[in-house]
Image (spheres, rainbow, N blue to C red):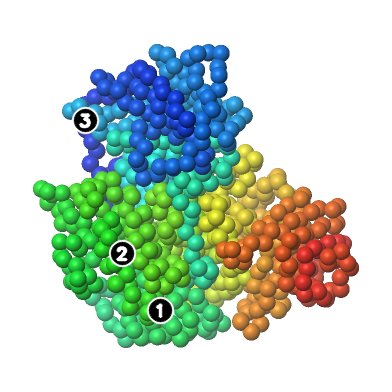
Amino acid sequence: MDKKKMYHQVEKNEFGKFNSGASPTEPIVDEWRMLEKLVDIVKFEDRLKITYQLGNENIDFVISAPSLGGIRITTTESSFFNPTEREEIHFIESDDKDIILFRTMDGTEFHLVNGPEWTIKIFDIYNVLQYCLTKDSVRFGFYENKLVKIRLEFDIDPDDVLLGMGEKFSDINQNGKRQFLWNTNCEYDIDSDGLELWKSYKNVPLLHSSRGNTLFYASYYPAVSDLGYTNPYKGIWEFWETEFDIYIWTGTLDKRLRSYTRLTGKPFLPPKWAFRYTMGAGNQVWYGENWEKENNPEKYLKILKEMLNGYRRLGITNLSAMYGEGWIAENRIAYEILNAQGIRMIVWCTPDSELEQNRKYLPNVKEEDYPIIKIKEGSKQESGGRIDFFNHNAKVLIRNQKNDYFIKGMRGGMLGYSEQITEDDMYCNGITGKEMHNWGAYWYTKVYGEATREIIDDDYIYYCREGCAGSQQWAAVYSGNQPAELYGLKQQLNAGLSAGLCGFAVWGGDMAGYEGKPNVETYIRGVEFAAFQPLMRSHGTKTRCPWDFGKEAETVYLKYYWLRENLIEMLYSAAISSNHRGLPMMKAMALAFPEEKDYLNNGEQYLFCDTILVAPVLEEKAQTKKVCFPKGTWYELWSGNEVLGSCEREVPVSLKDCPAYLKSGIVLPVIMNEKMKWAVPFSEQNQTKVIVITPPNMDDEYRYYAEEDDKYVFKSVKEDERVFTIYSLKDIFINKLLIYGNVHEIEVDGKKEEFSIVYENQTMTALRLKSDRWNKLTITCK
């Protein structure tokens, strides 16, 4: 059956119609105009101004080379993203007087061909054409002589891999798909298998092409995107706004993504504790199916105690945080119970405030100055008390509302429902809801974060359901509501990888899905997958407690809970790196291994924290899992077995297995118990730091951040097939090593070292050096 016909048969609502929340009104166009003629060119030191004839008027385009890389082409220089630092442009003389060209510092080359059929061409450093703009590719839609739409067309090929566009549930490759850039509550939590999945909580007009270019349209207005859905050779973006503002970057994908996050903001960095497992559940678990009417402290406090006793029975007494929804998040006794065990409360937060709340927390503010959205004159809707985050009193309101909660023990929250902003909303600075709808996630998370830092500094985490360009710098994100089914977990995988390609580095889904109670297989696969997500957190309409799924589920849960505890140093280090470099913790294969052309379209696996190749098993009753191994040597996490890369393998898997392979050349500090084995429980009394080492395939470098300002750079040098050396400029005070290989001899700082074996086999050696400090290790394997 034709895929498009199949979509139409099962999609709950037709494309562009939103069942939940606000819907945009499409502008009517009675005339499309083109840039018929180039009428003037003016060269400046740091930009090029081109004037085109558009109907009976002229329109100016400014072309510049931002210092963060690439080319910007815009009709406005007053947009929200407006890089002030631009390269000085050195125009290159051409034999053809009708060609104007210049080259940027990153090697991108701009060509303007003047004439009746004017053309703008952008080439990469290898002189490969990456982008072309002509009078046929950009059109301006007018209604009654007023500009209301801008339409941008560009060539694609059915074989192109097109990545990005925000958080997408359908696939990481958006070629052949269409997108509606209007944040919404997707409602994919029930019966969404086989749907087109065109909706998203997080829409970003950022498109990475496997050809070697990235296109970003700097707009928050609603837009419709057709990436080969109608015509397999044509991409179409239609923005319902009046300004043209695009960035084009060339080069490697990681370089292009870093340029984007330099422009829009580096990813948010939570505290280390936030990367440990977060327990919790939704209203239905705490209060029952009639949860809106069931404020019964005795009942939900009993459930809380039973949960904590259940974890204690499993030997878990070091829980980090709990998500408590509704009344439990306000209950003093609940906080006392959690505080006694060092557990932080995470609560549900919304972007609205009732009148009585405003009066209570803004006692010295006049009612007309409350930070509440106004409604356009003549509108029939109510504002619903939604907060105007542009109003300076909004931060005061949030700070005063949450102050007592932070004193009790709250350390963050789950944010949602900014997608409720409607077109008729009017903000204090004159911005309308049409522009603010997608943009709302930025201001929502920014104001919440700033208000919180004034109380507890950086010791908090917010994760938001919605997102937009730039919001990644203010909060982590979660994937919203997916069904507690294996196909729901596949939606999560697509979401996590695509979100990461748009700057959302700190991401997590609801463990084993949100809606309903998963079956045992789905629960176990959900636990395994969650352990390899930036955030590992439980939430849902039904229990996610391991003891509610049987003994096998308990066993698997404990295995991956303690593995997560082993890897906390790796997780926090990777989060710091993401915050510094603008790259995700979950890297799609196209981002992690761009030279592996066969894997660009692979959304089944990913590189986690630049260290572990992960292939979640999300197929029902799977006995094998196909894993694609990039070039190099890979080491199976649990057994140490080597796999030579540049191959694909059907790896045997039981229900307890999630394929995970360590990259060669890693020097990774972890926390273990004294036995130095993965996933073995430990406590503060018997935990120890261990460095996990895999032999390098070639000279390599591994970076580790102990803290934001405390970076270690380990250089690994392959001496021969059996010998390799690790260098560190900083002194290393960890003498316990877990080496993937059968160790024969070790030198410390050039001298033969005595060491004691904790355990060894043909593939792994756990040992303790006699020396307590080192800068150079030379390791010889048998």
What residue sits right under mark 3 in the picture? Answer: 146
What residue sits right under mark 1 in the picture? Answer: 409
For residue 157, above or below residue 283: above
Residue drawn at (33%, 78%) of the image: 404
For residue 145, above or below residue 188: above
What residue sits right under mark 2 in the picture? Answer: 395
Q: Secondary structure under badge 2?
A: helix
Are discs 2 and 1 less than 8 Å apart at CB? no
Q: Amino acid at mark 1?
A: Gly
- Which sits earlier in the primary sequence, circle 2 or circle 1? 2
Q: Amino acid at mark 2?
A: Lys
Residue 363 visible, this orientation: yes
Q: Position of residue 754 (x, y in %)?
A: 86, 73
Q: Nearer the viewer, residue 46 or 494?
A: 46
Q: Residues within 10 Å of mark 2 (few under 14, many from 20)?
A: many
Of the two numbered discs 3 and 2 in the rendering, the one whose residue sits closer to the viewer: 2
Question: In the figure, residue 36 lies in which quadrant?
Answer: top left
Of the two numbered discs 2 and 1 in the rendering, the one whose residue sits closer to the viewer: 2
Q: Position of residue 474 (x, y in %)?
A: 42, 58
96 displayed left or right of 693: left
Are discs 3 and 2 less than 8 Å apart at CB? no
Are discs 3 and 1 less than 8 Å apart at CB? no
Q: Amino acid at mark 3?
A: Lys
